[in-house]
Amino acid sequence: MNNHTLLERSGLALWITVLACGVATADDNALIRGTSNAHDPSSIVEHDGRYYLFFTGRGISSRSSTDLRDWRTDSRVFERSETPQWIYEHVPGFRGHYWAPDLIELNGKYLLYYSASRFGKQTSAIGLAVNETLDPQDPNYAWRDAGMVVSSSEGAPYNAIDPSVLLDSDGRLWMVFGSYWNGIYLVELDAKTGGALQDAAEPVQLAYAESIEAATLVRRGEYYYLFVNHGTCCRGVESTYRILVGRSEDIQGPYIDREEGRLLEGGGTLVLDTEGRRIGPGHVAPIGDQLKQFAFHFYDGENRGRSNLATASWQWSDDDWPSATDVRLSDPKDVPPRWPQRTAEAVESDTTKEK
């Protein structure tokens, strides 16, 4: 997500390789329902027969589903009165609208990373909430604030939003993050708690472009794959988001695209772009840990430009490059759920972020 300027300056040469098979069309007979206004989806995690999804919204919005098609609205992570105090101290003027969460299961618990920021500000932080279960009906269900993981302030090389977390095969835990400024960064986390690692090295820059954010890091075989978004989000049908990918044999890079372009120099192989009513696809969200499917959001050209959820299957080439197939979009007739517990003064659009 972009909380920097939305104006794109010319003159930056973006070395973008178009992977033709990566642009897929939707199966209109398999529409997704119940995800209107979903934006910046988290990784989707299965728990006791249900899939759980979190995304940008007041208090952090959530949905769950048994089949990845029909989604139920679940409770928010934080009610207004539950905003962790440290957020108000680090992000003055924060109004309870959290951005771009990511979800991972670690050591028998569920860890939810989220962004707290304001439009046009670099004073940002990524926080962590922990739960024993994802089922709101479970008596042990309760999100516990685990504090700040990484932060940024004016003058930092990065903006601390848009987390994506990867537990590597050697047991080390990593997080990529960043939006605009100097791009996407990587930092190691504490694999026991999920929080900040004591005496961790400074974050490493992985990718840069004039408008870049919404990174997702996954591993498949010998390669680490870094998905990023170029372009602008949050403008409805005028959004220009597109999903690109690069890979590396070292988690700290360098990441290159299929034509050897460096992601640090604006490179990236195209995975998904605007097509038909699917406008500005963004924010790759792995479904499970098998790298068979993923979700993403798009702006629906047939539903007032609302952000909605879509899913797709990965297709891997003989030389191990990913593309998208079997794309399924949300029902254009979907409308946002009502929240009767919200007071008039608390109402704020969850369609776009505060930027």
Image: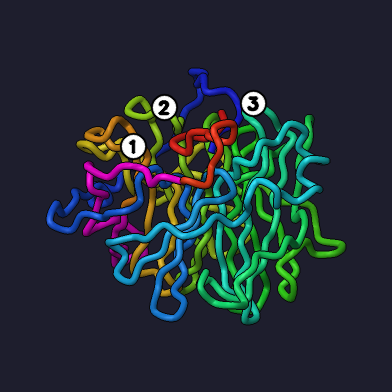
Give coordinates of residue 85: x percent, y percent: 80, 48
Dot 2 crowding, Cα within 10 Å, few <14, some 14–19, many 20+: some
Q: What's drawn in magenta, residue-wise?
A: 311-339
Q: Residue at x 12, y 56 (%)?
A: 29
SS assignment at label 3: loop
Indicate which disc residue 235 carries.
2
Q: Are marks 3 and 2 in contact (CB under 8 Å)?
A: no
Residue 92: mark in rendering: none
Which is nearer the eye, 306 or 244? Answer: 306
Circle 1 SS class: strand
Name the residue located 58 percent from the left edge and 53 percent from the top edge. Answer: 254
Looking at the picture, tell me which residue is in the foreground, 11 or 328: 328
> Residue, x 43% and y 36% (percent of image)?
351
Relative depth, front residue between 349 and 329 = 349
Which label is found at residue 120?
Answer: 3
Q: Position of residue 24 (x, y in %)?
A: 22, 50
Amino acid type shown at disc 3? Gly
Instruction: Choose the circle earlier in sequence order: 3 or 2.
Output: 3
Q: Measure how far apart labels 2 and 1 are at the Cα level.
A: 8 Å
Toward the viewer: 45 or 141? Answer: 141
Q: Amino acid at mark 1?
A: Tyr
Labels 2 and 1 touching (C-beta < 8 A): yes
Looking at the image, residue 268 sits to the left or right of residue 83; the answer is left
**Please, is residue 41 above or below residue 159 in the view?**
below
Vertical order, 21 against 2 (above or below): below
Q: Is residue 103 left or right of residue 30?
A: right
Residue 299, disc: 1
Please check the rendered image and state whether residue 355 is part of the magenta-colored stretch, yes or no: no
